[in-house]
Amino acid sequence: MTPIFTSGPSRTASLTDLDDRARDIFRRIVESYLETGDPVGSRTLSRGGVQLSPASIRNTMQDLAGLGLLDSPHSSAGRMPTHAGLRLFVDGLLEVGDVGEAERREIDARLSAHGRNFDEALNEASSILSGLAGGAGMVVSPVREAGVKHVEFVALDADRALAVMVFEDGQVENRLMRLSPGLTPSALQEASNFLAARLKGRTLAQAGTEIRAELDQARTELDKTAARLVEDGLAAWGGGDDTERALIVRGRANLLNDPATAGDLARVQKLFDDLEQKEQLIGLLDGVRDAQGVRIFIGAETRLFSLSGSAVIAAPYMTGRQKVLGAIGVIGPARLNYARVIPLVDYTARVLGRMLDG
């Protein structure tokens, strides 16, 4: 029999290490595993169209395991792909489809319904991916790099105000804010004047430290409730630093709908713990900002998911001038439907970027 690999498992396997027979068997195993979540045995492959005896198939499967591409949960079970095997499959054998016309219309309609409301668009994009892709949808808000042109607080009723910020790049952010009890219209106007004078022409990152330092001195001039509003307002926009930026996650319940995932409660809990690591997740998605197109992280390829065996499919969303705004993605078990999720993430990112770009 012609050998299917040219070196031992110490080297990362590539498609050139596999002959046609091994590629076919490997592809069938991975596709079956992604569909069912179950290990695949030699008899299943033999009955499924592989024109080899179960013994010959087992030999090939053993060779694939020697390359580090397959593993077995226990000695009597079939084989399933390792994270390295999934990576090889995704990079070299996966046939990615296109987003269906109905899904395109749904994505277009749901995002366009929010006009240029920045917060609602990000929330909706996360919900879209969690619903269509079957994992947890994630969106990280961008670092605001443009200077501020205008800022104002507008009272809506006794306990709510609309915070309006206009940036020099033409973007407008509108955010609802809770007001402190007893806040007077004059205090609200003082807060608007305070921010307008100190923010104008500066980015939020530049102004944040200065304004917080000034607040201690300004409390003698500003009503305490107005000063608190200034602090809350600035936090609502800029967050102070990148680790405090907004991370929107929707669809965690989807992670429990997969019987193969729900059966391993410890791994599901670890996956939920991963979702709480806001700083690390933002760092991961920010890494996508510098890449072109969709990026895929499987299991131990990132320290964040080394224990839970999760996977992330993410893409940057950008303006028509190719300025990256942020990143959007789906997180789930490594057994994600890559062929379906990759085009969904890519299309949603492109629509979101166009919408935010006006």
Image (spheres, grey):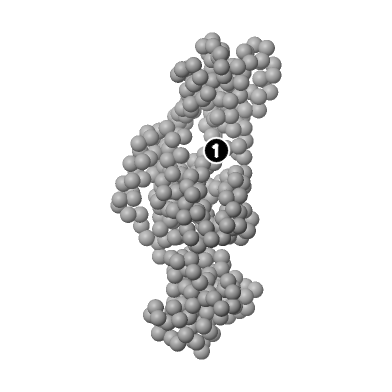
Residue 54 visible in the shown view: yes
Please report the residue visible at 43 percent of the width from the left and 53 percent of the height from the top: 133
The percent coordinates of residue 238 (x first, y second) are 57, 31
Q: Residue at x 55, y 29 (%)?
A: 236
Q: Is residue 175 left or right of residue 235?
A: left
Q: How many marks?
A: 1
Q: Residue 279 appears at what percent x and percent y?
A: 62, 44
- Please name the amino acid that badge 1 sits on: Ala
Pick the front one: 72 or 106 = 72
| In front of the other: 131 or 100 | 131
Locate residue 208, reporting x and y percent: 62, 28
Residue picked out by circle 1: 246
Find residue 318 and report its image quarter.
top left
Q: Considering only vertical position in the picture, is 345 above or below 29?
A: above
In the foreground, 61 or 179: 179
Q: Which secondary structure, mark 1?
A: loop
Q: Residue at 48% of width from left, 80% of height from top?
A: 42
Residue closest to the eye, 230 or 320: 230
Image quadrant where residue 94 sits: bottom left
